[in-house]
Structure formats: structure tokens, C-alpha cells
Image: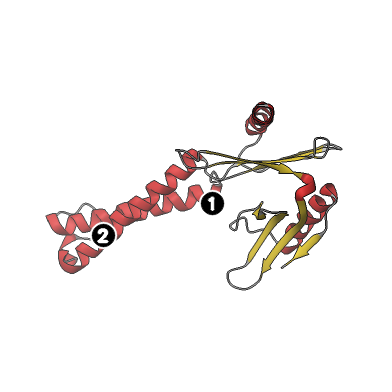
Amino acid sequence: MRVTSETKRLKSNSFGVFSQFQENATGSSMSWRSEHIWIETITGSRKTSNFCWTVILFLGSLGFLLVGTSSYLGRNWLSLFPSQQIVFFPQGIVMSFYGIAGLFISSYLWCTISWNVGSGYDRFDRKEGLVCIFRWGFPGKNRRIFLRFLIKDIQSVRIEVKEGIYARRVLYLDIRGQGVLPLTRTDENLTAWEIEQKAAELAYFLRVPIEVF
């Protein structure tokens, strides 16, 4: 019961701090540090780029569906694509299929933005020797993902760097007995200098070494 009550207290305190950050933040990540505590908020799915791509995908998919439907009904719902120039089979069917598929994908993206999936915070407390990781997930059993472990179990801060067309730069915590835990998303597009600086600051704060792989 002692562990349960302590966990609930940490959750309530952390949620309070996180709510304050959410009120002050406008979609960008923020961090707060003191001598013994480091709290960093994670943006999640509510990014400007996600909004833009979702709107573009929705409008494009809607246009494809309207063209396919116009070719089937023989009506010009879009002046740019006269229905007489597009045969329903096979062009109209293909465009309708792409339109429906795109609308499903855009609906999924709108849901992730609305639920702000992936947002949360990382809390490092050297005074209590605890690390708390919180993330918002999809509705259901894993809507609130809360991890808690001891700082003394952290063996190192790891950096994964892969250059090329599909560059990948991710920051991890190597935890004894639990493996590695990612702290950054693969789509954050951090530069090599930014990920190295963040790793160096975190490793200095936690008093652990840095590993690159």
C-alpha cells in the first residue's frame, strides 16, 4: 500500500505540473530545471506539420472521391475535371478507392491530433532518486502510460544516429534489467548537434555516461 500511495502522489504532482505547462505552452515542447529536478514536456501529435498534412490529405482525398462519384453519376461536381473525360471503369473506380482510403487515413490522423497521442512529460528527480515517464496513448486501457524507476538503475544515456536519406536520431535511457527506453520520437528531426547536446545535458544531470550506437 505504501508503494501505491506514493505512486498516486507522484502522479498527481506530476499531472499538476504538466497541466501548468500545457496552459503556458502553445504546442512546442518546454523544459523546467532546478538543482535536483528536470521536467520536460513532450509535444505529441499536435504539431503544425501534422495539421497541414492532414488538411492536405483530407482535401485531396475528398477531391478524388468527388471526381470518381461524378464519373459514375455523369455530373460535373468539379469544374476542373469534367465527368465526360473520365470513364467510371477503371479510372473512376480507382479514384473513388483512393479517395475513400485517404479519408480513412485523414480521419485517423485527426483522431491522433485530437487525442494528442504521444504527448506527456519526462520527470527526473535526483532528490528522490526517481524517474517518471508519462505519455498519452489511444483511448482504452493504455490511454495513460506511466513508467517509474530508480535513477540508480540507469546505466547510461544512449544515442542512436543513422545518417542517409532516412536519417534517424533517437535518445534512449539504458535501464538495468529493462533494456533501453526511447525518450525522443523518430519523427522529431533533431539535428546531430541538438541530439548530442541534449544527451550531454541529461547525462551530466543524471551522472551517467553516454553511449553512441
Residue 151: name its quadrant: top right
Residue closest to the far front: 1
Q: Which residue is mark 2?
A: 97
Residue 124: name its quadrant: top right
Name which residue lies at 50% across and 38% down: 143
Specify the label residue 127 is tagged with: none
**Disc 1 packing (10 Å; few <14; some 14–19; many ≥20):** few
Q: How is the image coloured?
A: secondary structure
Spatial separation of the CA atoms under disc 1 and disc 2 = 26 Å
Instruction: Please tell me whether residue 119 is drawn above or below residue 63 in the rendered image.
Output: above
**Quadrant holding the N terminus:** top right
Tell me where residue 160 appears, x and y as whole percent: 68, 64
Q: Is residue 80 left or right of residue 153?
A: left
Observer-nearest of 28 and 185: 185
- Is residue 82 shown to the viewer in this render? yes
Q: Which residue is mark 1?
A: 49
